[in-house]
Amino acid sequence: MSNRIERVNELIKRELSRIILREVDFSRDVLITITRVETSFDLNQSKVYISVIPQCQISKVLRILKRMIYNFQQKLNKRLKMKLTPKIKFIEEKETSKAARIEELLEKIKL
């Protein structure tokens, strides 16, 4: 992956995290994390991977985020000093749930 794409990924992750923290009011018992961002080489689209604790709230959180995606996109367009700002798309992070399952199985083996 090119250095430019990595910088764009980090920039989108940081700015989008700030926007979501300030703009979206989730209940206090939900923790949302942007785990990673993958931007296409042509800078046309960015996949934003979301992890939610508790896991049962993921569909609700994704629904809310997708409903507000136009607002997020507008704020990113203003904040990022880029000629073309990638279009964002929210996706559930599957890797963290797999890692949690592995940890759970390892704990059972220890006992």
Image (spheres, rainbow, N blue to C red):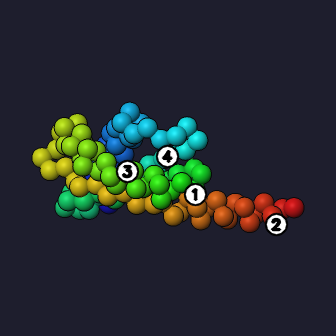
Image quadrant holding the N terminus, namely: bottom left
Q: Circle 4: is it few (<14), some (14-19), or many (20+) Cα within 10 Å?
A: some
Q: Position of residue 97 (x, y in %)?
A: 58, 61
**Mark before the other along the chain sequence, 3 or 4:** 4
Q: Mark 1 belongs to which amino acid? A: Cys
From the viewer's perspective, is the residue at label 4 or at label 1 nearer? Answer: 1
Q: Under tag 3, what secondary structure?
A: helix
User: For the point 28% across and 44% down, which residue is it?
Assistant: 72
Q: Mark 3 belongs to which amino acid? A: Leu
**Mark before the other along the chain sequence, 2 or 3:** 3
From the viewer's perspective, is the residue at label 3 or at label 4 nearer? Answer: 3
Residue toward you, 51 or 2? 51
Q: Under tag 1, what secondary structure?
A: helix
Q: Which residue is mark 4?
A: 32
Q: Quadrant of residue 56?
A: bottom right
From the viewer's perspective, is the residue at label 2 or at label 3 nearer? Answer: 3
CB-based contact (under 8 Å), mark 2 and mark 4 = no
Q: Which residue is mark 1?
A: 56
Q: Mark 4 belongs to which amino acid? A: Ile
Q: Circle 3: is it few (<14), some (14-19), or many (20+) Cα within 10 Å?
A: some
User: For the point 26% across and 44% down, which residue is it?
Assistant: 71
Gap between marks 2 and 3 measured at Cα: 38 Å
Eyeballing the image, is 70 above or below 75?
Answer: below
Gap between marks 4 and 1 measured at Cα: 12 Å
**Mark before the other along the chain sequence, 4 or 1:** 4
Q: Which residue is mark 2?
A: 109
Q: Which disc, if any, is residue 65? A: 3
